[in-house]
Image: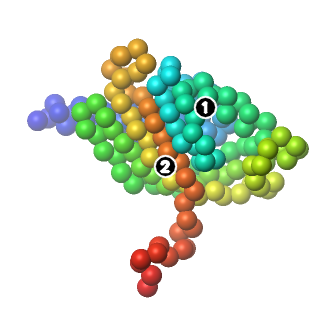
Amino acid sequence: MANSDTWLEADRAEILRLHELWMRANCGLHIDAMREVFVGGAHFQGFNLNGHTYFQFDEWAQLWTYLRTVMQMTDVVEQQIINLEIRADTAYLTFEATAVVRALPHAEEKSSGLELPVEPARLKFRGTEIYLREDENQRRNWKMWHCHYSAAAPSTEARPGFFT
């Protein structure tokens, strides 16, 4: 029993490490750090906070190359892990966080419809991340295979169905 508890804690620590690396990679849009987290090849698929779906690592990297020209995310704050569930070689993590973002100078010329604040603004969002203990070469390494992010309602807003 102690061995399985040790393995579970090691898995938990690795998934949390990858999640934190991913959050830091977003601040500065560091593609090499993203590469360490995402599964490679054509396996990755994600639903970005911008509302679009990106397939495989290279598409997300192309998105970040573009975003570097129009915006800056300087920090991820007030992060709360809601759940981390690990079952054999599959895990999912859910969380809420707030990012500090701003448009870069002259971004309106390139942003093609993105509404970005000029002054640093706080953006509350939530996410679900799916990890598998398998990389693109079938090695037993934890990697993110899917993520889904969306805007979160303000914490001061009552949830429908739960009004007081």
Residue at the farthest left position: 1
Asked if the residue under mark 2 is in contact with the one under mark 1, i.e. CB atoms within 8 Å, the reply is no
Q: Which sits earlier in the primary sequence, circle 1 or circle 2?
A: 1
Task: Return the x and y of residue 118 as percentages of the image width and height.
Answer: 81, 54
157 sits left or right of 132 in the view: right
SS type, badge 1: helix
Identify residue type, mark 2.
Gly
Dot label at residue 60: 1
Is residue 23 among what the camera can see?
Answer: no
SS type, badge 2: strand
- The figure's colour scheme reads rainbow
Q: Please rate how many residues cluster around mark 2, counting C-alpha atoms within 10 Å: few if below 14, some from 14 to 19, many from 20.
A: many
Which quadrant does the C terminus fall into?
Answer: bottom left
Residue occupying image coordinates x 45% and y 81%? 163
Q: Which residue position is annotated with label 2? A: 127
Q: Nearer the viewer, residue 129 or 141?
A: 129
